[in-house]
Image (cartoon, helix red, strand yellow):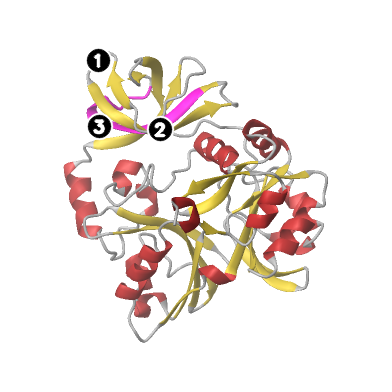
Amino acid sequence: MTAQDTLQRTHLYNEHVALNARMVSFGGWEMPLQYEGILAEYTHTRKAVTVFDTSHMGEFVIEGGCLESGLDRIVSMRIADMPLQSCRYGMMLNEEGGVMDDLIVFREDAEKWFIVVNGATTPKDARHFRGHLKQSHVFKDISSEIGKIDVQGPRSREILAALVPEIKKLSYYTFDRFNLLGETVRISRTGYTGELGYEIYSSADTVIPIWRELLKNAGVKPAGLGARDILRLEAGYSLYGHELDESITPLEAGLQRFVDLTKDFIGKGAFLKQQKEGAQKTLVGIISHDRRSPRQNQKLYGETGEEIGHVTSGTFSPFCQRGIGVGFVQKNHSQHGQKVLFGEGRHQGVMTGKTFYKNDSLKN
């Protein structure tokens, strides 16, 4: 058996092949990198609307009060006060304060929760939930039953409302159930591109008809992982396995605002200890002096040549018309505006914040 044979495929795999997508390995899945071309798909997302297959993501259902079940202690953010039909982003940490995964919690009912996790970490996450939830409460991994399509771009409301008029009521980080092609589906409004966007969670059986129906509109194009990576980097979003993993803490990743210290959670002691002592490294943005991009795992150097960190993600930014990236550097070398050199060629850049894209439609 080859490595290619072991890759999982989403329910939309044959749709991608029919569209002549270039398929690549991503977190154990065979996923589309591009269709028409990465920059064309990026541009269409920023100016109009594209659809992404994100059916590789994991989905769990938990039934029970969040405090009584132990769910509240598993996640870093407070969820007890979430309104119904709202979503909340956060993380689950290990005892050392490292990020086991970042996730989004949906409150479906007073005691029913829908949780979305990363595809590559779904089995590990499921074990963690099962190990820390009290046995009297229900946990279901429904990942294999769910198809997920992200509709992203400034025209996404207009396009999707033609099929589901009621989605106009959704505000940022809320969701509801709607009828789409005869099935009751979850649709949320969160996003990972910096633009207005929606996520459709349907049954595995219905995801193909929904995909085809969306692409019947001449204004909608499919987009792959290549465009998605540029979009999320410009918008300042972290990617698990790059800016986040079990050895990286929320303080180091700059995500402490998603940690609620007024409640108990796994890893809180380690978080407080690091908060008191200070993190030794921090995540910064990097903008190149030219079109050359920082690349993952390249070393970062101070302007006098000393090694100060490494790149976690990088790309050419059409918005900035320069190479951009993010990476971890020593805390005492993290001043915005400070010169930084990257790669063996010691290419020049400047440290910035992690958000490069400013003209977004995200909350319109």
Question: Can residue 84 be seen from the camera position used here?
Answer: no
Residue kind at label 1, given as amino acid type:
Gly
Question: Can residue 322 be seen from the camera position used here?
Answer: yes
Say what secondary structure mark 1 lies in: loop
Say what secondary structure mark 2 lies in: strand
Which one is in front, 108 or 225? 225
Which one is in front, 169 or 235? 235
Q: Is residue 113 left or right of residue 362?
A: left
Residue 326's tag is: 2
Q: Is residue 324 magenta?
A: yes
Which one is in front, 317 or 268? 317
Give the magenta range.
323-336
**Residue displayed at 55% across by 64% down:** 86
Q: Is residue 281 left or right of residue 294?
A: left
Residue 83 lies, with reference to residue 358, above or below; the image says: below
Q: Is residue 361 left or right of residue 108?
A: right
Q: Is residue 65 magenta?
A: no
The quarter of the displayed image where residue 357 is located: top right
Report the residue marked by disc 1.
305
